[in-house]
Image: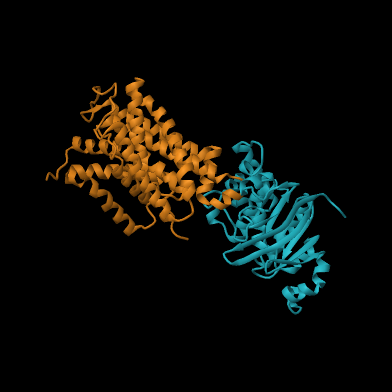
Chain colours: A cyan, B orange
C-alpha cells in the first residue's frame, strides 16, 4: 500500500536548554493516512507536532511537506499551505464568539480571498460538522466550557481546509462520553479524506483509529508500524505500556 | 474658592473637558492598540504625537494646506515613521525582556525630542487655523465658542468612528483583535503576527499624530517636550479604561478630560496634572483591572 507522500520528517532534533526533547527523529506520513504518535509523558510528542506547525524551530533536521522544504517557514505560512491543528490546551480568542473564532481560520488560514460574510457562513457549517451546540454559536469563547472549547478549536483548525491535521490529545480532560464523541468526529474527518497526525496516550483510541503508529521515548523513535505490530513490540511494551494493564485501557 | 458654579461655568467645564478629552481619546486609543497587539508600552507615544503636530505645522506653512487637511499628510508620514520604528527597533527586542522594551521606548523619547529641537527649536508654536477668529454663539446657554473647538470635536468623532469600524468590522480588524487576544493562536490560524505588529504600531502612531495636530491648532503648545505629560495621561487612561479595551479608552479619555477641567475650575490650574494620578491611584485601589477591564478568571 503506497500512497503519495504528504509529510516527511528527517533527522529532526530539538533541545530546550540542555534537555533534548526530540532526538534525530525520522518518519513519514502518506496522504489520507491516520498516524498516531504515542509515548510516555515527556517523550517529545507534542514538541514534534509543534515543530511541524512551526511553533518551535528545530535545531537540526528537515521537514518536507508536499515535496517542499518547510523547515524555515513560519506558522502562518505553513497554515496557509495546509497544516493546521489543535493544541493540548485549547487555544481560543476569548473575546470573540464561537463563530468569530472559527471565521478567523476561514479568513486567514488558507490562500484566496474570503469575505467576512462568507467566512461566517463557512464557520457555522464547520461548527455544525464538529457537532457544536447550536445555541452556543454566539457565545463568547471565554464563557465556554472545556469540551466546547475543544470543539471550537477543532472547528478552527478544520476551517483552514487542512491537508494535514495535527491533533494533540483530543480526548484528554474530557469525560468518557465526550471522549467517545470526539473520536466519532475524528472518524468523520477521516471520511473527508483529511490526513491526520495525532498524539494520544490512550492506546484504545490509537488502536481503533490509526493506520500507523510511531512510538517515541525520551525523544527518540523506538518503534513504528501498524497498531498491532507496535502493541506486540517488546521495546514498546517495556518502555511505554508497562506490565500489561494499559493495553486494555 | 467659589463653591457655587454658574451654568455658564459648568458649560465651560464640560466643553473644555470634551476638547481635552478628544486629544486624550486619540492618544490613548493608539497607545492601547499598540499595547493590545504587541504587549509593549510605547512610552515615546507623546513624541510621535508632537512629531505629527510638527509635520502638520510644516505642511500648512510650506504647502499652504488647510491644517485640517494636513492631518492626512501627518497620518501618512507618522504612520510610516511608526512602521519603520517597529520594524527597525521594536521587532529586534520584542520578547527578549520587558526591560529591553522599556529602555528602548524610553530611549526613543530623547532621540525624538532632540531631533525635534534641532529641526524646529524649542520655541512654542501653533498651527494657525483659517477659522481662528470665527466664533459661534449659542443662544440657549448664552455662550461664545471658537469654531475650531467644534471642528476638533467633529474630526475626533469621525476619526474614532473610522477606527472603530476598522477594528470591529473589517478583515484586518479581526486579525488585529485575534492577535491581541491570543498571539500564538493567531499565528497558528495563518495570521502574520509580525505584520500585525507593524500595522498596529503605524496605526497607533498615526492616531497620535492626529492628536498632535489638533492640539497644535487649538493651543500654542507645540514644542519638542510637549508630548511627555499627555502621553503619561494617556497611559493613565488606558489603565483606567482597562488595558486592551477600545471602548474603555474612549470613555476613559472623555472622563479624564472632564475630571481635569473640573479640577482646574474648582481647585485651580495647579492641580491639573496631580488629578491624573490621584484618579489613577484611586481606581487601581478600588478596581485593579480598570473600569472596563477583565476580572481575573
Q: Quadrant of the C terminus of chain A?
A: bottom right
Q: Which residue is drawn at 37% across and 53% down?
A: B290
- Outermost left residue: B1
Image quadrant of residue A172? bottom right
Q: Is residue A103 above or below residue B55?
A: below
Expressed as whole percent of the image width and height from the top left, the position of residue B5 reads: 17, 41
Please tell me in which quadrant of the rendered image residue B148 appears.
top left
Residue at 27% x, 51% y: name it. B277
- Residue B38 position, x and y percent, is 47, 48
Horizontal relation, residue A240 to residue B237: left or right: right
Residue located farthest toward the bottom when viewing the structure as drawn:
A243
Q: Where is residue A23 in the image (x, y as percent from the top left)?
A: 68, 64
Quarter of the image for the N terminus of chain A: give it.
Answer: bottom right
Q: Is residue A171 visible?
A: no
Observer able to see residue A110: yes
Where is residue A88? Give x, y as percent. Answer: 62, 61
Q: Which residue lies furthest to the top in this view?
A: B64
Callout count: 0
Q: Which of A30 and B289 is in front in this view?
A: A30
Residue B95 drawn above or below residue A171: above
Q: Which of the two residues, A135 or A4, is positioned nearer the viewer here?
A: A4
In the image, taking residue B30 as reference, residue A58 lies left or right, namely right
Residue at the far right in the pictured view:
A1
Amino acid at each position: 500500500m503506497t500512497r503519495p507522500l504528504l509529510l516527511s520528517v528527517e533527522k529532526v532534533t530539538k533541545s530546550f536548554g540542555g534537555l533534548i526533547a526530540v532526538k534525530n527523529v525520522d518518519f513519514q506520513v502518506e496522504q489520507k493516512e491516520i498516524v498516531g504518535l504515542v509515548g510516555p509523558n515527556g517523550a517529545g510528542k507534542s514538541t514534534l507536532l509543534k515543530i511541524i506547525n512551526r511553533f518551535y524551530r528545530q535545531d537540526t533536521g528537515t521537514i518536507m511537506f508536499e515535496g517542499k522544504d518547510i523547515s524555515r517557514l513560519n506558522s502562518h505560512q505553513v497554515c496557509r499551505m495546509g497544516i493546521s491543528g489543535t493544541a493540548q490546551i485549547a487555544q481560543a480568542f476569548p473575546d470573540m464568539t464561537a463563530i468569530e473564532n472559527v471565521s478567523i481560520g476561514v479568513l486567514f488560514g488558507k490562500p484566496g480571498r474570503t469575505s467576512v460574510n462568507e467566512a461566517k457562513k463557512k464557520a457555522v457549517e464547520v461548527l455544525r460538522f464538529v457537532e457544536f451546540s447550536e445555541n452556543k454559536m454566539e457565545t463568547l469563547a471565554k464563557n465556554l466550557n472545556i469540551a466546547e472549547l475543544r470543539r471550537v478549536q477543532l472547528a478552527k483548525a478544520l476551517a483552514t481546509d487542512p491537508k494535514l491535521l495535527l491533533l494533540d490529545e483530543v480526548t484528554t480532560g474530557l469525560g468518557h462520553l465526550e471522549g467517545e464523541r470526539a473520536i466519532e468526529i475524528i472518524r468523520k474527518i477521516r471520511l473527508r479524506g483529511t490526513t491526520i497526525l495525532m498524539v494520544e496516550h490512550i492506546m484504545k483510541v490509537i488502536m481503533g483509529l490509526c493506520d500507523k503508529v510511531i512510538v517515541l521515548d525520551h525523544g527518540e523513535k523506538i518503534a513504528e508500524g501498524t497498531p498491532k505490530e507496535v502493541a506486540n513490540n517488546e521495546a514498546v511494551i517495556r518502555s511505554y505500556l508497562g506490565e500489561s494493564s494499559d493495553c486494555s485501557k | 474658592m467659589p463653591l457655587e458654579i454658574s451654568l455658564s461655568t459648568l458649560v465651560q467645564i464640560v466643553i473644555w473637558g470634551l476638547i481635552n478629552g478628544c486629544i486624550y481619546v486619540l492618544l490613548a486609543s493608539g497607545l492601547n492598540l499598540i499595547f493590545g497587539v504587541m504587549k509593549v508600552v510605547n512610552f515615546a507615544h507623546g513624541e510621535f504625537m508632537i512629531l505629527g503636530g510638527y509635520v502638520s505645522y510644516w505642511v500648512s506653512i510650506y504647502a499652504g494646506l488647510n491644517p485640517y487637511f494636513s492631518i492626512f499628510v501627518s497620518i501618512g508620514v507618522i504612520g510610516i515613521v511608526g512602521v519603520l520604528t517597529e520594524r527597525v527597533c521594536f521587532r529586534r527586542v520584542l520578547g527578549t525582556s520587558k526591560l529591553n522594551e522599556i529602555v528602548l521606548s524610553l530611549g526613543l523619547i530623547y532621540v525624538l525630542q532632540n531631533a525635534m529641537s534641532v529641526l524646529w527649536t524649542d520655541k512654542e508654536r501653533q498651527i494657525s487655523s483659517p477659522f481662528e477668529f470665527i466664533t459661534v454663539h449659542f443662544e440657549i446657554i448664552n455662550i461664545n465658542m471658537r469654531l475650531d473647538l467644534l471642528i476638533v470635536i467633529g474630526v475626533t468623532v469621525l476619526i474614532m468612528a473610522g477606527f472603530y469600524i476598522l477594528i470591529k468590522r473589517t478583515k484586518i480588524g479581526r486579525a488585529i483583535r485575534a492577535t491581541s487576544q491570543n498571539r500564538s493562536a493567531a499565528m497558528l490560524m495563518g495570521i502574520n503576527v509580525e505584520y500585525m505588529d507593524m500595522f498596529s504600531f503605524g496605526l497607533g502612531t498615526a492616531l497620535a499624530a492626529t492628536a498632535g495636530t489638533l492640539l497644535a491648532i487649538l493651543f500654542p503648545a507645540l514644542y519638542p517636550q510637549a508630548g511627555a505629560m499627555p502621553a503619561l495621561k494617556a497611559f493613565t487612561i488606558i489603565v483606567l479604561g482597562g488595558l486592551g479595551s477600545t471602548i474603555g479608552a474612549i470613555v476613559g479619555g472623555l472622563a479624564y478630560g472632564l475630571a481635569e477641567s473640573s479640577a482646574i475650575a474648582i481647585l485651580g490650574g495647579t492641580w491639573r496634572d496631580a488629578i491624573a494620578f490621584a484618579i489613577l491611584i484611586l481606581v487601581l485601589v478600588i478596581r485593579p483591572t480598570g473600569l472596563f477591564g477583565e476580572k481575573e478568571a
